[in-house]
Image (tube, rainbow, N blue to C red):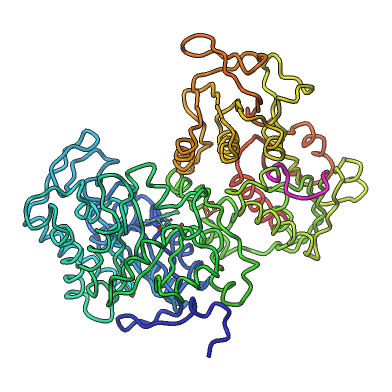
Amino acid sequence: MSNLKYKHLFEPIIIAGTLFKNRIITSSMGYLDVLGNRDSGYTHKSEAAAFYERRAAGGSGMVTVGSCYIDKEFGDFGDRHVFLDDPYSLFSLYDIAHSITRYGAVASAEIIHCGLYSNRKTGEPSYGPVAMEDMGRPVYEMNEGYILALIEKFADAAVFAKRCGFGMVTLHGAHGWLISQFLSPKLNTRTDRWGGAPIENRARLPLEICKAIRRKAGPGFPIEIRISGSECYDGGYGIDEGIALAKQLDGYADLIHVSAGSHEIDDVFTITHPSMFLDEGCNSVFAAEIKKNVSLSKIVTVGAFSNPELMDDIIASGKADFIAMARSLIVDPDLPNKIRAGRESEMIKCMRCLSCFSNVQNNGKFYCALNPKSGREFTEKYDIPAAQKKKVLIAGGGIGGMQAALSCAERGHEVILFEKESRLGGVLRCEENVPFKRNLARYLDAQEKAIIAHPSITLRLNTELTPDIAAQIGADVLIAAPGACAAVPPIKGITPENAAIMPASHAYIHPEETGSSVIILGGGLVGVELGIYLAQMGRKVKILEMQDKLDDGGNHLHAKGLAVEIKRHGIDVNLSTKAIEIAENGVLAETKNGNQLFQADTIVYATGQSPLHKESMALHAAAPEFYVLGDCVTPSNITNATSSAYEISRTIGRYI
Ligand SMILES: Cc1cc2nc3c(=O)[nH]c(=O)nc-3n(C[C@H](O)[C@H](O)[C@H](O)COP(=O)(O)O)c2cc1C
Ligand code: SF4
């Protein structure tokens, strides 16, 4: 009899002769530049191995290495992940697989072919279900011979993955890549046995691949297939065909992993990777429907999980057999072990900001906004302890200052943290009542609690750190992290006396002070998110932005979720529109069509932040070692603040 609180989630299970120690899967995530090939200039295989290893060490029962390509020439999007048809990948992949299996977790290689989207980055032609043009390149139709050879190539890739030490494969049949192109009624209009209206025809390719893998890789090697339960867009298939498809695959794949949507449609991307505006476990409905209709395969559900009660209930009530998570295990790889030990209150919950994914696409790094150790697992693993313990003063208890305090204390330094306000959290506290930011608020509370509880941190609230105080204490190190304050735009008529005009931070805290119509000046993340918040409360919102597009602050994937909400709430976005004067009932602005009056009851400015340079510079001589971090350097984002806090803390006491 299990004493575990979430006993269904931790019930071991044997599938195709393999023991899965629990029902938690690290969902597919592809690490870039893991080549280790003859022709690669460099390789990040050690970083990649450490990334997956950390998820295995944190307690996941299975860890998936995402995006392993089966065809280097015609199956690769161009992102340089892993090639399974290149024998020179073996040593790198062995390292990666072993980094997972040595924790008793099952290592799965996600095998993928991009089909018509292959070679997009190089501009070379590609092959897909039907002939067409994609981004100015020809896409050739795969003929019967090509398809038969491709099936063998998939199976060979699985055999190679097995040789590299993987215990199973995950066939990527979801989200718009080759197999889902064959499954989609919109794309696969072939008239032969591989396409057209009958689902048996469209499902033939994944079915034959599953059979070929079984034939070539042999028994004792579980096969998982990832499908979209519904494509979630007009013209794509819905859950009825998702069920029909799963019935075709039932028993041929040991696990049917039910995701949703497609990455090619911007609005739907935010369902595949549920945005912060969607509910916890929002895509589990698709898995539950499929689970009712299959009898042999086990069912995996994925998307926006972080609540242990919900996860356990999904398994207990038979809606799915496994829970897969990507982002929740980026922000907290120890989530399985914490839940298992009944320490779920210590979990850091993902706020679904998608900074991690945008960072991977922009810079190749799995940097998470809230967990600065993510993407740095390799250096973290071989971290050298601080040679000297130091006394560290930190000015500013915002997100960066809090992280610096905790990271310094973790490394054995004595920390005194000064915050001029009565609580920690800084400017982000203004968003704590925003429903779609609840996990950010939870994180700020958790950081604050950890600081208060830490024996090596002294907290001085309601106290601004001055050079005199610093001199009296006589610290070794001073970290200035005072942040920034709202910049008041130089627009005629913006006066503090006018109650109808306010900064974004005020509108966040006191939305009740805004009228029924609101103009937001500035289309950056702060302005747009505020607009959505106010629109959710029934306000009619107009955004005026000087530039010709909204500013996503480098997080282009979060911007997709914002765009969906802008549309949903009918927010009126006015680009290339420069406010020039506050008028009696609104704002006079310069537009492409001349000056125009925009009317509203309340005007909110979200036109950026002014870094507190003076306050930071005043402290520079107050200790022998001096650092600045976060918005006081230049206004930036959460990821930069937490990353730099963590890196600075690792440097202190290490070299001098
Ligand atoms: C940084 C990142 C990389 C991802 N890479 C892949 C990938 O290579 N292959 C894949 O099938 N899905 C990939 N995904 C999608 C996830 O596996 C998962 O389906 C999705 O993020 C929803 O789960 P979550 O809400 O737990 O994050 C990726 C997701 C993230 C956040
Ligand atoms: S960056 Fe944001 S979405 Fe990604 S894991 Fe961290 S909190 Fe979650």
At x 63%, y 46%, the residue is 434
Taking 107 as reference, is 425 above or below it?
A: above
Relative horizontal placement of residue 108, taking residue 349 as reference (left or right): left
Q: Quadrant of residue 298?
A: bottom left
From the image, which quarter does the C terminus lie in? bottom right
Image coordinates for residue 472, horizontal then vertical, percent? 93, 48
Examine the structure image and report whether residue 347 is included in the region drawn in magenta: no
The residue nearer to you, when weighing 2 against 31, is 2
Q: Read off the magenta span.
A: 421-429
Give the residue furthest to the top: 594
Q: Quarter of the picture for ligand 1?
A: bottom left
Residue 414 in the image, given as x and y percentages of width and height: 80, 60
> Who's the residue at 40% across and 70% down the image?
319
Magenta segment: does it hold 427? yes
Quarter occupied by residue 621: top right
| Whether residue 462 is visible | yes
x, y (%) of residue 463? 87, 45
Picture coordinates of residue 614 (x, y %)? 78, 31
Above or below 501: residue 439: below
**In the image, 575: left or right of 123?**
right
In the displayed structure, does residue 148 sit left or right of residue 333? left
Say which of 466 and 358 sits in front.
358
Kindly identify the residue that appears in the image at 21 percent across and 69 percent down.
Answer: 210
Give me the residue at 83% from left, 48% from top: 422
